[in-house]
Image: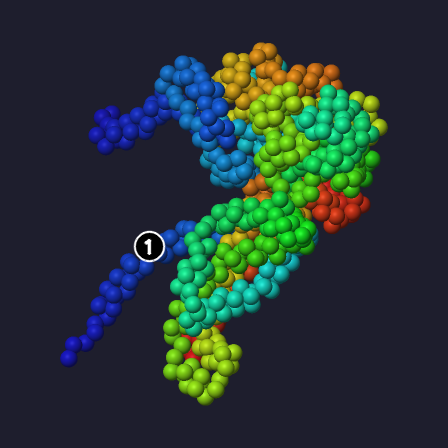
Amino acid sequence: MNEIKPKNSRVERRFAVFFLAPALLLLITFRLIPLGWGFLMSFTDADNTGQANWVGAANYIKAIEDPTFQDSIVNTLLLLATMPIMVMLPMLLAILIHQGVPGGRFFRAVYFLPAVLSSVIVGAIFNIVLRYDGSLNSFLDSIGIDGVDWLGSSNTALISLIAVQLWSTFGMSVLIFMAGLTTVPDDIIEAARIDGARFWQRLYFIVIPSLKPIIEFVAVVTTVGLLTNMFGLIYVLTGGGPGTATTMPEFLIWLEQGKLNRPGYAAALSMFLFLMMAGVAYAQVRIMSRNAKV
Amino acid sequence: MKLSTKLKLAMAVPAALFAGQAVAQELTVWDWKSGDPATQAYFESAKEAFKAKYPEGDVKFVVQPHDQYYTLLGTAFGSGQGPDVVLLHGGSQTQTRSEALVALNDEADGFAGADVFSVDNDPYAVPLTIQGFVVYYNKSRYAEAGLNADAAPTSWDELATVCEAIIAKGDVPCFAMGNKQGFGGEFFVTLATANTFTEADYTAWAAGELAWTEPKVRAIVDLFVEMNDRGWIQKGANSTAKFMDEYEMFMRSDAAHTVGLLSDVAHWKQFGEFLGDENLGAFPMPTPGVAEAKLPFAGGIGWGVSAKSENQDAARALVSILTDADRQATFALETGALPANPNVDTSKLSSPSLSAILGIMAERPAGMPHAVLNPAVLEEWKRQSQKLLGGETTADEAIAAMEAARAAN
C-alpha cells in the first residue's frame, strides 16, 4: 500500500498557490490596495492637486451632516423598498413563460433585449420618451390627458428612474428564474394539479419554496446592481435632479470627486457605500451558507 | 581607473535616455475641441508653428469628452500624471486647480478676460476666447405677437410686456430654458447680478462673503421665481438639457428667447445660420430698477500648463502659439468665438446681432459672478433652481439652503 508522503502534499500546496497567485494578485492590486488607499484618503482633504492634509474624521462627520448625502440615503432606501417588485415581477413572468403561454419564446427574447443595452443607451432612449415634450406626453395629449414632467418633477422623477431601471434589468432576472424553474419537479406540480390545487396554490406552496435559493440570489444581485450600477442611467436621465430627487450615493461620489474636486470627501462617501455593500455581501454569504447546509 | 564593461553600459543607458529626452519635446495636450472639424485649421496651424520652433518636437492633441473633462483631469492631476497643456474654462474650474498649474504672467499679459483665470492676480491660463451671456430673440415671433421686431426690450417692464404678448399669442413660450443639469439656474446667477454688482460686490462674492440674504444676491432667487410664476419660462425646463435641447428649441423657432453665449456654441453665428442673421436679435438681460442693462462677459476658455509637466519651456511656448493673434484669428473665423487677444482683427466676423453685442460690450461691460462662485455652492444653487421651477420650494427656503451651503463651504 502506498503512503501519501508529506512531501507530495507540500508540492500540491505549492502547485495550488501557483494557480491561485494570478487571481490573488489581481484581487490585491485592483481591489484591496485601492480600498486601503481610499480608506486612508477619506481622512484627508485631498483636492486633486496632489495636496492632502490629515483631517481625521471630519469628512465622515461632514457626510453625516450633509443634507444631500442624507437625501441620497433616503433615495437608496426608497429604491431598495421596490425590491419585492424587482424580484417578483421577473419571477412571475418566468413562471408564465415556463407554463407555456403563447409566444413564450418571443417574450423571453424581448424581455432579455434591454439587458444587452448599456445604461447610457437605455437612458438616452427613455430621455426621449419621458421628457416633457417626449413621446409619452405626446401620447397622453392625444387622448386628452395633460402631460407630466416625468423626469423634471420630484414627485415622479425617482419612480420614473426606478421603472426604467426595472425595464433594463428584469430580463436577466427572468432568464435566471427560468433556469431555476427547470429544477422544480414537474411530477410534484402535476400531482398537486391532479389533487385540485389551483395555479396560485401550486405557485405558493410548491414553486416559490423550490425557487427560494434562486429568489435569494436574484435579490442579492439586484441589490448590488441598484447600489452600484445606476450611475449611467441617472447621469443621462436626470443628472441626479430635480434637486436631490434622484441623487444616489454613487452619483454623489462622482460629483464630489470629479466636479467638485474633493476626492477626500468622495472617499469618505465611498466608505459608507462600501459598508452598505459589505452588509449585502455578508447577508449573501450567510444565506448561501444556510442553504448549503439544508 | 579602468571602468568595467558592465559599469560603462550602466552609465550609457540612462545617458542615452536623458539625451533623447533633451532633444524630443513631445507635448500632450488635453482639450474638448480638437475633435471638432470646425477647429482643425486652428490646431494644425498651432502644431506647425510649434514644430517650426522645436523641429524635434511634436504635439499630441488628445480630445476628451466635455462632460467628463474635469473628472478625467482631476484624476490625472491627482495621480501626478496628466497632460503638459490643458484647455480650461475660466472661473472656478481654473482657479480651484491653480495649485496644479503654472502661473503664466508673461504669456497672459494684455489679454482680455485673464482675471477669471487668475488667483491673486497671477493668471494660470491664457484666455483663448471671450465668453458671455446675452438674450437672443426671434424677430419673427415678435412680429407674429404684434411687437416691433427691431425694438428689443431695454427694461424689466418692457420685457414683461414682450413676454405677455408672446404668451397671449400662445404659439411658443417666452423663454426656452434647459435646467436639467442646472445650467439654466447657473446662467441666471450672472443675469440677475451683472447689472447691480459693483467691483466690491464681485470681490466679496468671489470670496464667499456676500450672503444670499443681501438684496442684490436675493434678486437671483426672487427674479427666477418671478419669471417662473409669470409663465415666462417653458414648461418642462427641468427635463430639458441646456446643451443643446434648449438651443435647438430656439433654433426651431419654438421659443421667442433664449439666453445664449457669445462664443463657440449657442451664439450669434450658430443661431444666425438657422434663423437667418436678419431674423436674430440680441439684448442684455434687463433687471428691475436698472436704466441700462450691462452685458456680462469674461475670459471663456484658455490654455494652461501643468505644474508637473517635464517640458515647461516647450509647454509655455505652445500656449503662446495657441493664443497668438494668428491662431486666435483662425479660431475666431472658424467658430465665431470672440478672441481674447486684443491684437486680433475681428472685422471679418459680422452679423447684425454681433454688431449690437460688440457695441454693448464696449459701452456697458459687466463681470460674470457665476464663474467665481464656489463650485459646491453653485451645485446647491442648481438643485434649488430645479426645485423652484417645480414649485417644490419657496424663495425663502431656497435662500436658507443657499446660506447653509455658503457656510459649509
Q: Is residue B189 in view from this perspective?
A: no
* Image quadrant where one finds the C terminus of chain B: top right
* Image quadrant where one finds the N terminus of chain B: top left
Residue B313 horizontal/vertical position (percent): 47, 20
Q: Is residue B393 in view from this perspective?
A: yes
Q: Is residue B274 above or below residue B181?
A: above
The residue sitting at 61% across, 61% down in the picture is: A77
Pick out the residue farthest to the left: A1
Q: Is residue B323 above or below residue B193?
A: above
Pick out the residue farthest to the front: A143
Residue A54 horizontal side relative to residue A182, left or right: right
The residue sitting at 19% across, 76% down in the picture is: A3
Front residue of A261 and A183? A183
The amino acid type found where label 1 is placed reads: Pro
Residue B405 horizontal/vertical position (percent): 71, 44
Q: Which residue is mark 1?
A: A22
Corner quadrant of residue A294: bottom left
Kindly state the secondary structure of the residue where label 1 is placed.
helix
Pick out the residue farthest to the bottom: A195
Q: Is residue B395 above or below residue B35?
A: below
Corner quadrant of residue A184: bottom left
Residue B224 horizontal side relative to residue A184, left or right: right
- Tag 1, which chain? A
